[in-house]
Image (cartoon, rainbow, N blue to C red):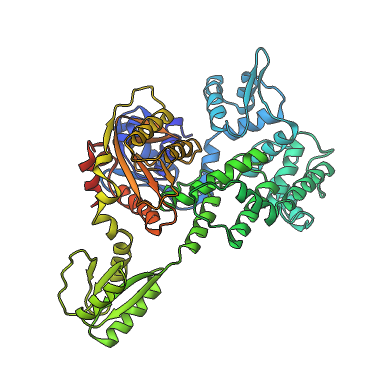
Amino acid sequence: MLNERQFSLLDAIESQPVSLSVLARQTGVSARTILRDIDYLNFTLSGKAHIRTAGNALYQLEIVDRKSYFQLLQRHDNDDRMLALLLIHPVISRAQLADALNLPDSWVAERLPRLKTRHQRAFSLASRPGAGHYIDVDEHKRFLLLANVFRKDPFVYPLTGMTPDAYAQLQEECRRQTDWPNISPDYRVSMILAACALRECPQCPGPTIPEKVRERLNHLQHQAESMTPEYVRELLAASSSAGSPHVVDAQLIEDLTGHLKRCVAMPQWLAENRQGSMNHLKAAWPAAFDMSVKFINHLRTVMDIPLIDSDLPGLYFACALERHQHESTPVILLADQNAIAAINKMAIEREVLNCRVIVARTPDELDAICEELTPALIINNGHDTLDNGPRHVLTIRNIITSAGIDQIKDFLASAFIRQQPERFFPPEGYFHYPNAAGESWAQIVAAIAARLCAEKRLTPEESQRICQREQEGENLIVNRIAIPHCWSDRQKPFRGFFITLERGLLVNGEEVQHLLMACASAANRQELKIFSFLASQLNSHSAETIEKIRDYEGFVALLR
């Protein structure tokens, strides 16, 4: 069996590489113990996942077979078995739990608080003096929670007559049913098993779906049908905020409608597996995740449903942003050979998104074009020598290969930032904030925003928006640097103010060593690219390098 420390270790390295020293500090054991745990985990997870070194003494979990991996974890984790017993019995004592699980009473005493913390967003685990423990939810939610447990593992609780053959027969029966098109057959099976465990059925699973389960399925199907595009459009309008990009289109409404239908038809209060980290996408499209968080929070106030795969709305908003950021980026290709110029122009426009290539035959022609427009990049594909000056010049001779295309993509994404980091991250906005040991994240953000506001670097409205954004959840943290941000109505360039902290702290379970308070205009396409650039640059450094930053110069050095 895996112990608590080993589960924590898997959680820590699943989404990002982590150093041995950080893992030891987080778990409170020696680095040698962590190495022994890694050897044991690699043996246990053989064929399903593997912990590999990612360079610079970093360790990361590589999952080979996700379904088998999570099934294996469930067999090592008795939380689901204990949760099933708590849901089936109105009240059950610790001794009864230990006896039913065939585990020591001390183990149950240790795991009950963990179970309470693990599922605190889904339900409340309470105790009754002299009686025992119970799940404090209404009958309908109790049923759905138990169905969620059976969906993860149909044999988590022994049911009379429920053999693998009987289970296969039940699956086949549910697959033949067509009355509930929005509810998957496996979810119907889990509801039948839950009804049997709660003794709501006159018999153990048989050839037909019990009447009480039919009533619940009809109710869920009716709720799913109420999730219409018109309703989603109203939700989007109610959750919009000042400064955010206008990205609502037919495709976004269709994506969100389908997602809400699944959430309502198949309520999933217990995550079926660990959510992967979305930090890289969150950093590349923070505006999308800000809109997603507002949308989800508003929805939760009007409807009590679990939003399965809560990161998916963020992806839908990100795709909508991508559809709306379609303005072509001008790129000048200086080439004195017609055939090569034609081939390279076609290759660049095919491979580089939203790129418009203008061919110049001579340096004089290049200068004339530059007087009419400002290119994002000049590619010297000929034999002339160009002086970089204030222009962005990339020299690639002859036919441009895939490596050259990658160079162009990287250059377009970051050249304007690398050459002028002080424009976007002004040195006069830097200061050191001596946060106290007990100071909360909300207090730190409010104090820093207030100082920047007093220095006229942020407006009072921007300061207020940043503080409100940080309270909404899904905080943007890139490799131990938190980025509280807001979207401004003003057309000023991106402003990012780097602040070092006296001591690190945890924000939503992630370590934060420093802070970059940012204010962007969502109407400016380059503003959004800066977040993607920050994500790629900061993640390219080790956690130890981030921790050693002591001033503004150290931060800017990471960006060049």
Q: Quadrant of residue 450?
A: top left
Can residue 34 be spotted in the picture? no
Total marks shown come to 0
Q: Quadrant of residue 141?
A: top right
In this rendering, would 381 be left or right of 262?
left
Residue at (79, 40) in percent of width and height: 204
- Return the residue found at the far top: 130
Residue 468 or 192: which is nearer the viewer? Answer: 468
In this rendering, would 173 be left or right of 92?
right
The image shows residue 540, relative to residue 114, as above or below, that is below
Q: Position of residue 237 (x, y in %)?
A: 61, 50
Q: Quadrant of residue 375?
A: bottom left
Q: Position of residue 325 (x, y in %)?
A: 45, 62
The image shows residue 383, relative to residue 45, as above or below, that is below
The image shows residue 329, relative to residue 119, as above or below, that is below
Q: Position of residue 238 (x, y in %)?
A: 62, 46
In this rendering, would 313 be left or right of 509?
right
Residue 59 or 48: which is nearer the viewer? Answer: 59
Can residue 466 be spotted in the picture? yes
Residue at (75, 43) in percent of width and height: 192
In this rendering, would 482 be left or right of 228?
left
Q: Position of residue 240 (x, y in %)?
A: 56, 48
Residue at (62, 52) in percent of width and height: 259
